[in-house]
Image (tube, rainbow, N blue to C red):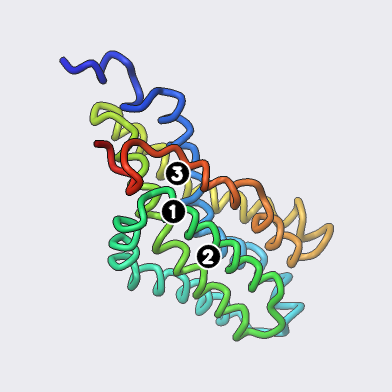
Amino acid sequence: MGGGEGTGLSRAGGGRAVRAVLQAVAVSALGVLPAFLVGALAVQIRADLDVGLGLFGLAAATLFAVSGSLARPGGRLVQRLGSRRGAALAAALATTSLTVIALAGSPAALVAGLAVGGLANAVAQPSANAVVSELVTDQRLGVAFGIKQSSIPAATLLGGLAVPGIALVSGWRWAVAGPSSSPSSCCWPRWPVAGTPGGRPP
């Protein structure tokens, strides 16, 4: 038996591994949040921009189409940058996406914002996966990735809560702008990384 099995979660310390998993959840959720927010806020956005329901299907499809088509190059980019810098890039792109959506005055701007969100998601998912792989022992990877996968329903939950919590009180634009200024969007430079600057353990 290796020493890592007796010490629990991580190669670099349990606290760092737990923080890494939680931040992986946050960055993964941030990557898909624009699509779920726009879907949840469709009634308010439709009334404001005077657009048809079909636009929302197109907008959500745009994010996932961009994300899917760029997933492979996004993964290669994260390999070059390392998980910390990859996550910082994903957070910056997601923040840009939410800002463009919040300021959108036309259907084209709304779709453009979700296209940027697709770029963010293409980088966010491999960054989150990389840091979990780097810091969590093989014996706990299943648990860690299971927790990380909770990011998708978490993003859906946040999108739904944004309607009664913010949109109906302050308007849909504030509901979209809120996550772009949250601390989670700015915490990635402190992403716990084991080993070399590229993020891989020695």
Between the C-alphas of marks 1 and 3, the distance is 13 Å
Instruction: Please determine whether, in this image, residue 184 is positioned above or below residue 75.
Output: above
Q: Depth check: give the residue in front, 75 or 36.
A: 75
| Residue that mark 3 sits on | 24
The answer to whether 180 appears left or right of 193 in the picture is: right
Please tell me the numbered disc located at residue 93.
2
**Are there few (<14), some (14-19), or many (20+) residues within 10 Å of tag 2?**
many
Which residue type does callout 2 highlight? Leu
Q: Is residue 100 left or right of residue 11?
A: right
Query: Furthest residue to the left?
Result: 1
Residue in the foreground of this view, choosing between 195 and 44: 195
User: What x and y, as percent, mark residue 193?
Assistant: 39, 39
Which tag is nearer the camera, tag 2 or tag 1?
1
Residue drawn at x 46%, y 76% is 62
Image point (30%, 68%), residue name? 73
Mark 2 and mark 1: span between their CA atoms?
A: 12 Å
- Quote the CA–CA distance across marks 2 and 3: 16 Å
Q: Residues within 10 Å of mark 1 (few under 14, many from 20)?
A: many
Instruction: Locate residue 182, reporting x and y percent.
Output: 67, 50
Residue 200 vertical position relative to residue 93 in the rendered view, above or below:
above
Q: In x, y percent, where is residue 133?
A: 30, 40
**Local SS, label 3:** helix
Where is mark 1, residue-wise? 85
Three-letter code, disc 1: Arg
Identify the amino acid type marked 3: Ala
Q: Mark 2 vs mark 1: which is more N-terminal?
A: 1
Tag 1 secondary structure: helix
